[in-house]
Image: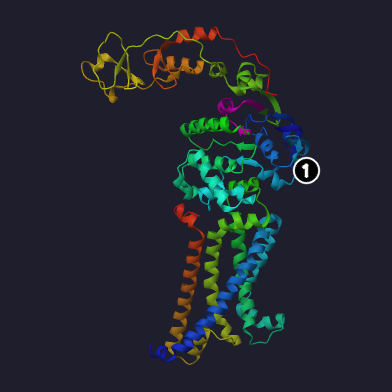
Amino acid sequence: MTWLGDNWRTVLDLAVSHLYLAGVPLVIGLVLALPLGWAAKRWAGAYPAIITGTGLLYTIPSLALFVMMPLLLGTKILDPVNVLVAMTIYTVALLVRTVADGLRAVPDHVEQAATAMGYRGLRRLFGVELPLAVPVIAAGLRVAAVSNVSIVSVASVVGVSQLGDLLVDGYNRVIWGELLTGILACVLLALLLDLVIQAGTRALTPWVRAQGGRP
Amino acid sequence: MIRFDAVTKQFPDGTIAVDDLTLTAPTGKITVLVGPSGCGKTTSLRMVNRMIEPTSGTISLDGQDTGRMNAAELRRGIGYVIQHAGLFPHRTVLDNIGTVPRLLGWDKKRTRDVSAELLERVGLAPELGARYPAQLSGGQQQRVGVARALAADPPVMLMDEPFSAVDPVVRDQLQDEFLRLQSELGKTILLVTHDIDEAIKLGDQVAVLRVGGRLAQVAEPAYLLAHPADDFVADFVGRDRGYRALQFQQVPRLPLRAEPTVLLGEVPSRSDSAWLLVVDGSRRPVGWVEPGRVGQRAVTEADLHRGGTVARAEGSLRGALDAALSSPSRRGVIVDDAGELCGTVLAHEVLTAIEETDRPERDEGLS
């Protein structure tokens, strides 16, 4: 642990970058997944295409995606934007299905009541459907958060600094303290994001506790 | 007034759900659509607020063709109650009730005041307002559903099996309260049910639909029971329709006999009768006892035989006959409006009264 004592400032800086590279795409990805998921729910015919299409994006190896980004975006190879965009793609891939399924899980009689009360358009989506989909979407978001924290570490290979650097450097120079710190820091970061999402979900869904935890 | 004019609904798969329906639901009255499953009653209801569009024909509200109105605005002007209440699980009871007012753009204060008032009106305690639907019983949820439908004070209400998801005792209670509420509010109501008893109890007018969406008969309940138009209607209203029709016939002057009683907690004074009626301190009947079994001790709650029903003197012949038939002593207990004992009556005396009463011979329908 002497390694950590000597390098904690570096570790902290890398952790902040890691959080930024994993967290910002999580938010952007969620915002993008909402209309896509909504479309998949709204047009039953488009559901398989949208879900399979976005789902396939997740199968692209992260290294390949990081390397492809400058070609697609015209950015410099070391630009962190490459990583942000790539991570956003992964987040979208994970969340579109979740959003669609969350919206589809809104009980039929609630949908009917919303129609009969005269709800329509965005007010219906934000007033009735989305709030009720929050528990399902939040569950997907937690998976995406952990997945992002894990995948971002690969970005060290394309020269974008974050906690992954500790893994690469610790491995190459056989510094066990550095390697262990990198792993632990990633785990802690994933836990932190998870806790934040859980707290946010709790705040948004007081009604779930009212029905004994059943969403 | 809701008017269906030659309304037909054919679904894309070719099924005809409603076939050439012409029907008027008069202003301020309850019109019940009743029929077996597949008779198109719910489809008919949903065409009124355009949750389903008719294939042909027109539906009008007070002479205005609903097909020409904006669907969402039309719906905000019509109260809607569905089977499982359909409350929004993520909103508190008060916010649920205030749904339509908020959609109509009322401010928060006014919406809250109206919602709180309606909560009370449907018989729920104010503190329930802050709860979520999942924290209420089925019956309470249904009351909130009714309050929500009433919130913006719409002249027209659509009710789709509003009381079928609750147990029979609660259902009966909800029906009674609904009738009391309607007597104060006088809404134009179209109610769908598969339960002929409910239809007869609630409807000012009952429309019986047959499978395939054809109107079989529309009439006031008493007329429907007395004069079913055909075998289908006769079969649907049931074999005991003659007995049930009695509920629409007020008790004429029945020859009531004085009934010896014993006060609960006291020793029966006489024991020449096999059964003795027990009353409480306000002369309200509480049950029957067998003096022979009680002997010389005080009558307790445990001695009571509570099988007999009690009929109101101002009630129906059905109630009076049932009181006589269900009483262990064969003497039917009749009470006044305050629940105090008036006297007893025997079944054959009620039957004599029935024979002297005419069957309903009124015009079909209300309009």
The residue lying at 57 percent from left, 49 percent from top is: B110
Q: Chain ID for label 1?
A: B
The residue lying at 49 percent from left, 87 percent from top is: A166
Q: Which residue bears the numbered disc 1?
A: B68
Inspect the magenta stretch and tell me whether residue B128 lies in it: no
Q: Is residue B84 visible?
A: no
Q: Say if B98 sits above or below A48 in the image.
A: above
Q: Position of residue A155 (x, y in %)?
A: 58, 83
Q: Is residue A137 visible?
A: yes
Using the image as rendered, state which of residue B126 and residue B328 is in the foreground.
B126
Inspect the magenta stretch and tell me whether residue B190 lies in it: yes
Answer with left or right where residue B152 lies relative to residue B92. Answer: right
- Helix, strand or loop at mark 1: helix
Which range of residues does the magenta coloring cover? B188-208
Q: Position of residue B361 (x, y in %)?
A: 64, 13
Q: Position of residue B294 (x, y in %)?
A: 24, 17
